[in-house]
Image (cartoon, rainbow, N blue to C red):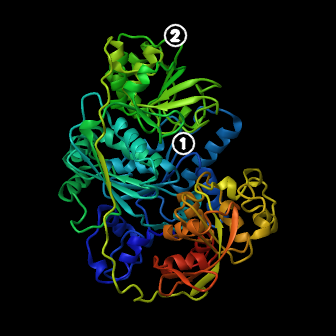
């Protein structure tokens, strides 16, 4: 369980729980299942959710395979599920076409809404077709589900096991994250875009301030942002480290849907007069006494065009600075779910009109969907881009994730309107990737270097101002009645968990450090062999130091990296039932619970241990400190080697819904149990 402990301690009493809810909590309240009568949900709570919709893309076949492996034969609710083909659409190999055929056949057999390759990127389809809709909870087995927050839908990613669970039962679990309020004030200057806002946020708040948080965007600046700008910002809250990025319901959003209604017609099953009228009458907002874990503020009027990179979203620089450095580029991209909507294509076309792509540059363009491309063709913007010398790609993903044509080669430099510029993601690991707005990408493609639209006209880019920003962590009043209350315990679930703390003192220990990649696809590896290679890449001596029932404690963002479930199951194979860290990578947290491994976030404890063992250079340290977690009281007590109490802290309550998953050996076991009912 990932715990925001300050808030969890606050939430431990009935009197405090009478407070209001923020917008994230209100939406979860609507989709939470089997709550006790009158119970309100808050950050930190574990809930069973029944999302309005669940999307999967090219990974639909692995999800289907897992679904069938659970013994399921029919999806619980075929109106809940959406399958899109969007990632590897340029791949015409027999293997990929067979997978695509399998997905389509499965969808047809189950009556699932299916969108074939070429229709567009799944996230864009979910918005165009009204699956992700204001004030609903929509999930997808893809990390950029956050995009839906741009239209006021609480969108968040799930892993494949979660998707299979939803297919089979209609439900999965979610822990409501701490919620950060991001206030946008001031007016956005001319020439500054939504992409510049999120690139700036990623670059100036780059110390994991919003890691594993839900974000709610508020403030006077929000109403002046177009919906496409909001979608771009929400999309890249993923890169910022958040689990969701939610914008409010306002008149601009209502207008967006009224315009959309004119396109889809009044008979559309989700975007119609009735749903828009209901939305108009119910512009739900957070309560005035809602609690936020953090409050970040940025003055939009101080922003200028910003560029992310190279090879990291945590690095951002003013465009004016990079322009002066005369960085030549080889490739430019206007593609992806981030910035390939109609307004983006039109903005790029306005820059490119009357110009040609630099002879040393390849410029690739792909619309977010076939509908977007059709609209761009009608507008004339699409032809303008092609006339400049751009190379068209099919509507869908592609270079953004290193698939298909136009990838970066060794030593090349690329600038892209996508969301990620991780080293090697868009091609060679020896290439450099930058992120920018469609306007800057188009201008750079003409100039042959990272540059601005002003430079095409022979003008000097405006210098950046000092950005006005602020971060506040509200001080919460903690209840003195910390030990009150009793948690109901299901038969078979332990009332307490105790073990010696085993310190692995590092931040960002990734899944390859926990379970080496070379073993990931060895399907015949035994549980004993998994146990022996646990943490091998972090510390080869780990297997000689650790013992069953030890409790690993590590730093921040433990389990970052790939989605391999073995990072959790190898720890279980080692005989350990609990991991403690300053914070966890989200996918690792989900995989842990899904496989019956418990997790606790206790930043204070890792800081105490770092002080205690500051002069110890060993990678894995037996601390002699004993942690006892009294599940019935939701209380953790830690004593040192002499029995002295080091820490006493209230943590999150483990509800019976989560206990049931653990008792049944994980989410798959729980699903199988549900299917037999």
Residue toward you, 381 or 463: 463
Residue 179 appears anywhere in the view? yes
How far apart marks 1 and 2 lie (CA) works out to 34 Å
Counting residues from the start of the chain, the first of labels 1 and 2 encountered is 1
Q: Which residue is mark 1?
A: 85
Indicate whether 242 appears above or below 342: below
**Residue 447 appears left or right of 524:** left
Mark 1 and mark 2 in contact? Answer it, CB < 8 Å. Answer: no
**Residue 450 appears left or right of 608:** left
- Labels in figure, total: 2
Residue toward you, 276 or 112: 276
Indicate whether 622 appears above or below 277: below
Residue toward you, 171 or 313: 313
Q: Quadrant of residue 283?
A: bottom left
Q: Nearer the viewer, mark 1 or mark 2?
A: 2
Q: Quadrant of residue 444?
A: top left
Residue toward you, 152 or 447: 447
Image x and y of residue 402, in percent = 60, 35
Image x and y of residue 587, in percent = 56, 58
**Residue 504 appears left or right of 660:** right
Residue 359 is tagged as: 2
Residue 126 appears anywhere in the view? no
Q: Secondary structure at mark 2?
A: loop
**Residue 429 appears left or right of 132:** right
Q: Residue at x 67, y 60 (%)?
A: 567
Indicate whether 489 appears above or below 158: below
Q: Residues within 10 Å of mark 1 (few under 14, many from 20)?
A: many
Q: Quadrant of the C terminus?
A: bottom right
Q: Residue at x 39, y 51 (%)?
A: 131
Q: Residues within 10 Å of mark 2 (few under 14, many from 20)?
A: few
Image x and y of residue 239, in percent = 47, 46
């Amino acid at each position: 369980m990932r715990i925001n402990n300050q808030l969890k301690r606050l939430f431990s009493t009935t009197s405090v729980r009478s407070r209001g809810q923020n917008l994230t909590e209100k939406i979860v309240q609507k989709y939470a299942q089997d709550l006790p009568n009158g119970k309100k949900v808050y950050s930190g709570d574990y809930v069973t959710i029944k999302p309005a919709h669940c999307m999967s893309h090219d990974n639909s076949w692995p999800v289907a395979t897992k679904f069938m492996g659970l013994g399921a034969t029919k999806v619980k609710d075929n109106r809940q599920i959406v399958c899109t083909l969007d990632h590897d659409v340029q791949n015409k190999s027999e293997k990929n076409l067979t997978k695509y055929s399998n997905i389509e056949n499965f969808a047809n057999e189950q009556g699932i809404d299916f969108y074939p390759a070429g229709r567009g990127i799944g996230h864009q389809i979910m918005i165009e077709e009204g699956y992700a809709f204001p004030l609903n909870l929509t999930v997808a087995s893809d990390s950029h589900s956050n995009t839906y927050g741009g239209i006021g839908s609480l969108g968040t990613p799930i892993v494949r096991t979660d998707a299979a669970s939803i297919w089979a039962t209609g439900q999965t679990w979610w822990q409501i994250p701490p919620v950060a309020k991001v206030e946008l004030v001031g007016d956005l200057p001319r020439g500054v875009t939504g992409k510049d806002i999120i690139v700036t946020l990623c670059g100036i708040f780059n110390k994991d301030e919003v890691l594993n948080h839900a974000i709610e965007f508020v403030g006077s600046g929000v109403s002046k942002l177009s919906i496409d700008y909001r979608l771009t910002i929400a999309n890249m809250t993923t890169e910022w480290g958040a689990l969701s990025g939610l914008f409010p319901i306002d008149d601009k959003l209502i207008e967006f849907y009224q315009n959309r209604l004119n396109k889809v017609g009044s008979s559309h099953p989700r975007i119609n007069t009735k749903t828009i009228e209901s939305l108009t009458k119910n512009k739900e907002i957070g309560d005035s006494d809602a609690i936020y874990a953090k409050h970040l503020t940025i003055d939009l009027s101080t922003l200028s065009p910003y560029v992310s990179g190279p090879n990291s979203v945590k690095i951002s620089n003013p465009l004016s600075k990079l322009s002066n450095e005369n960085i030549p580029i080889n490739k430019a991209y206007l593609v992806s779910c981030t910035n390939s909507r109609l307004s983006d294509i039109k903005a790029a076309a306005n820059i490119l009109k009357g110009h040609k792509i630099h002879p040393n540059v390849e410029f690739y363009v792909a619309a977010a969907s076939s509908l977007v491309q059709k609209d761009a063709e009608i507008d004339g913007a699409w032809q303008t881009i092609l006339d400049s010398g751009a190379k068209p790609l099919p509507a869908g993903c592609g270079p953004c994730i290193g698939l298909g044509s136009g990838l970066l080669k060794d030593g090349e430099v690329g600038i892209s309107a996508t969301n990620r510029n991780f080293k090697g993601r868009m091609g060679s690991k020896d290439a450099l990737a930058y992120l920018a707005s469609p306007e800057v990408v188009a201008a750079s493609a003409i100039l042959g270097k990272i540059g601005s639209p002003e430079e095409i006209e022979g003008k000097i880019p405006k210098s950046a101002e000092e950005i006005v920003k602020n971060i506040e962590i509200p001080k919460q009043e903690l209840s003195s009645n910390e030990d009150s209350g009793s948690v109901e315990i299901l038969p078979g679930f332990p009332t307490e968990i105790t073990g010696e703390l085993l310190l692995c003192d590092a931040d960002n220990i990734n899944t390859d450090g926990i379970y080496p990649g070379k073993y990931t696809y060895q399907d015949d590896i035994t549980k004993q062999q998994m146990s022996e290679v646990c943490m091998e890449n972090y510390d080869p001596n780990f297997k000689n130091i650790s013992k069953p029932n030890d409790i690993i404690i590590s730093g921040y963002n433990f389990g970052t990296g790939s989605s391999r479930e073995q990072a959790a199951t190898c720890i279980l194979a080692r005989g350990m039932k609990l991991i403690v860290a300053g914070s966890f990578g989200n996918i690792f947290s989900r995989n842990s619970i899904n496989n019956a491994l418990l997790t606790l976030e206790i930043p204070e404890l890792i800081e105490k241990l770092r002080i205690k063992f500051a002069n110890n250079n060993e990678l894995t340290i037996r601390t002699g400190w004993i942690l006892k977690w009294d599940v019935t009281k939701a209380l953790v007590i830690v004593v040192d080697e002499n029995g002295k109490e080091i820490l006493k802290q209230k943590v999150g309550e483990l509800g019976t819904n989560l206990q049931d998953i653990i008792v049944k050996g994980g989410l798959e076991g729980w699903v199988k149990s549900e299917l037999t009912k």
